[in-house]
Image: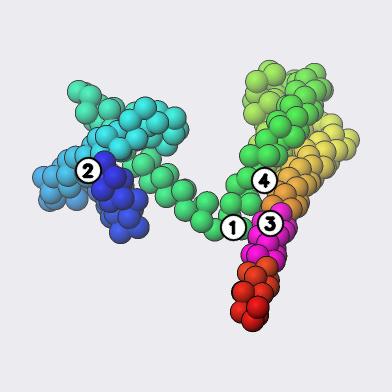
Amino acid sequence: MRERTAAFLARESFQRFIVGVILLNAATLGLETFPAVVARFGHLLTVVDHIALYVFAVELIAKIYVERSRFLRDPWNVFDATIVTIAFLPATGGLSVLRSLRILRALRLLSVVPSLRRVVSALLRAMPGMSSIVVLLGLVLYVAAVMATKLYGSTSPERFGSLPTSLFTLYQTMTGDDWGNIAREVMTRHPSAWVFFTIFILICTFVILNLFMAVVVSAMDEESAEERAEERAVLEDTSEHTQRILDELAELRKELAELRRPN
């Protein structure tokens, strides 16, 4: 019984059905944000939402029955169990949208597409290097914010009057959002302020962004190299196995030929 249940859960048609239910549930949760739709189809949306929840619960129980102690070893299973449990708790209407996060299970398809798998693996591999760059960016942003507060705090207190305000303004400048007007406002009393903003944008927007890209590209190259090495190893193992089979066939042919010789 357990084997048949596991085979049923592993069917591609069943997985497509679950993804369809997830998408339908996400659509109903989105439609609930429209008062006119709720006023006209509110009962239908609630029924669909409950049916989807029961489908998720049945699937979860079936997976627990099949996997037993191995169920909690899979982070996706823990995620699904948490979402379904929250949905069944009382007074959780505001959190019901969390059930739509089950659509993230579709990310399992990433393991099927080699190119996407390489990208995801490269991003995970690049996390340590990216964290170092984030620290560097934070340090540059902090130093620039302290300098801007001391230099331009009296000129533009709304933008540089305090350290938190300067941090927000410089972050806005780093993203390129209306930084020209910010610079012009300061340059009315500090004509040389364009030097500060230009250097800050060059460092944060171009240099550090390129560092992010370099780390990711390097990780992708390493991932591709490892995959190529694994493919070569598989091909070599296959070649060796094939050669052994051919050698054994050759030996069998020799033995058959010797047996057929007249004494």
Local secondary structure at mark 1: helix
Which comes before the other along the chain, label 4 or label 2?
2
Q: Splitting the image into 4 quarters, where does residue 50 fall?
A: top left
Mark 4 vs mark 2: in front: 2
Residue at image position (81%, 31%) is 189
CB atoms of marks 3 and 4 within 8 Å? no
Residue 34 visible to an observer of this rendering = no
Residue under label 1: 114
Please state which amino acid type lies under the numbered disc 3: Asp
Residue under label 2: 1
Residue under label 3: 237
Would you call the spot at circle 3 few (<14 residues within 10 Å), some (14-19), or many (20 or more)?
few
The stretch of residues the image draws in magenta is 232-248
Please state which amino acid type lies under the numbered disc 4: Ala
Residue 108 visible to an observer of this rendering = yes
Mark 2 and mark 3: Cα distance apart in space: 37 Å
Mark 4 and mark 2: Cα distance apart in space: 40 Å
Which comes before the other along the chain, label 1 or label 2?
2
Q: Could you say where residue 33 lies in the image, as x and y percent from the top left?
A: 27, 44
